[in-house]
Image (tube, rainbow, N blue to C red):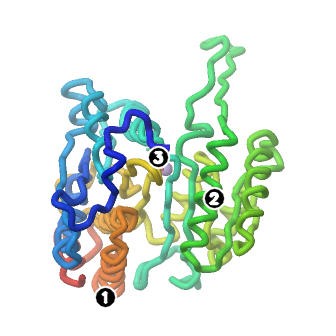
Amino acid sequence: MRSEQSERDPERPRGCRGGVEGYKIAVIAGDGTGPEVIREGLKALKALSEKNGFKYETIEYDLGGKRYLKTKELVPDSVLKELGGMDAIYLGAIGHPDVKPGILEQGILLKLRFYFDEYINLRPIKLYPGVWTPLKDKGPKDIDLVVVRENTEGLYKGLGEFRDKGTKDEIALQISHNTRRGVERCIRFAFEYTRKRNKDKKLTLCGKTNVLTYAWDLWQRAFNEVAGEYKDIKTDYAHVDATCMWMVKNPEWFDVIVTDNMFGDIITDLGAMIQGGMGIAAGGNINPEGISMFEPIGGSAPKYTGRNVINPLAAICAAGMMLEYLGEENAARMLEGSVMKVTSERLKSLSAGKMGYSTSEVGDLVVGNL
Ligand code: IPM
Ligand code: MN
């Protein structure tokens, strides 16, 4: 469902390619190295629009820790309203060393995910050629999977309470909230995605049915029921702890994994490491019928800020995911091809300061190879 607050005209198709206005892309460069990497993503976007003939405009929003420290504002209602009229949101990084942990995460990142009901967090885990992985004897053929993480429920719902806070009998409850509707729409998305991806046509449910017997009972029942509608998709189940093990030992067993918010958060950081690290890992917060937000998953990296050494490929890949979602599949493919050329032929490493090139030079290389 489109979020009710949304201002986006439902009659205006997303991807009104060739239309007078083109795509409206909100840019939240954010904190730390966010602006540096977003600049490179926008550079690639510009080149791709020229080569592929789509139009777009960007509208910048100043949100993040810097603004919060100055004004105490997180996301003003007026901004939420405006964002509701966009075709997509392109986000750099949110996080500031002087702001207490949790405030910006909940007040900006999670706020946007929830407000726009971006119920899927899509995280491709793909080892590009030439990229170092800590997994011995594994290569690009083995590491190519996608995690579909539920993005609006579970433990992230924020339900819970303290009892007898501050006493020695204190209890803290943190509740995982799973609705049949929320679980089913996520599972359905995962089946559709697995079919469209057309790789091994295999979907693995990653859960914890042996211990978390309420939540995962619901997940398993919903999964089995929906599976009945997708006879062409092979299904599998793995506990989350075992999933971590297999992702390291036999990542080639996975095609698409579907899981809840918390488990998805954890296994996608593991995934980011086996695909070469935070320099390359991108994700999409997707509402298939609404406004989606694309981001490098690495964070604001304060110690590298302003030094032109951070790797922009994650942000560039996030722009690629955004293009795919907007329907510019050709441009997305072109961009991925170029990123692969750059990783296989040019970069010495994906780590900040060790690439053999600066942030802006990596952006130029990607544009040059399109
Ligand atoms: C992520 C991040 C966020 C999350 C944090 C920053 C709230 O770790 O996008 O994975 O936990 O979802
Ligand atoms: Mn995370």
Callout 2 environment at 10 Å: few (<14), some (14 to 19), or many (20+)? many
Dot 1 or dot 2, earlier in sequence: 2
Q: Amino acid at mark 2?
A: Val
Question: Residue beneath label 3, please?
Answer: 118
Q: Are marks 1 and 3 in contact (CB under 8 Å)?
A: no
For label 1, the SS is: helix
Spatial CA distance of label 2 from label 3 is 15 Å
Callout 1 environment at 10 Å: few (<14), some (14 to 19), or many (20+)? few
Q: Nearer the viewer, residue 219 or 87?
A: 87
Tell me the number on the disc at residue 258: 2
Residue 247 appears in which quarter of the rendering?
Answer: bottom right
Spatial CA distance of label 1 from label 3 is 36 Å
In this view of the protein, can residue 112 be seen by the observer? yes
Residue at left offset 81%, top offset 42%: 213
Instruction: Tell me where residue 114 appears, x and y as whole percent.
Output: 46, 38
Q: Amino acid at mark 1?
A: Glu
For label 3, the SS is: loop
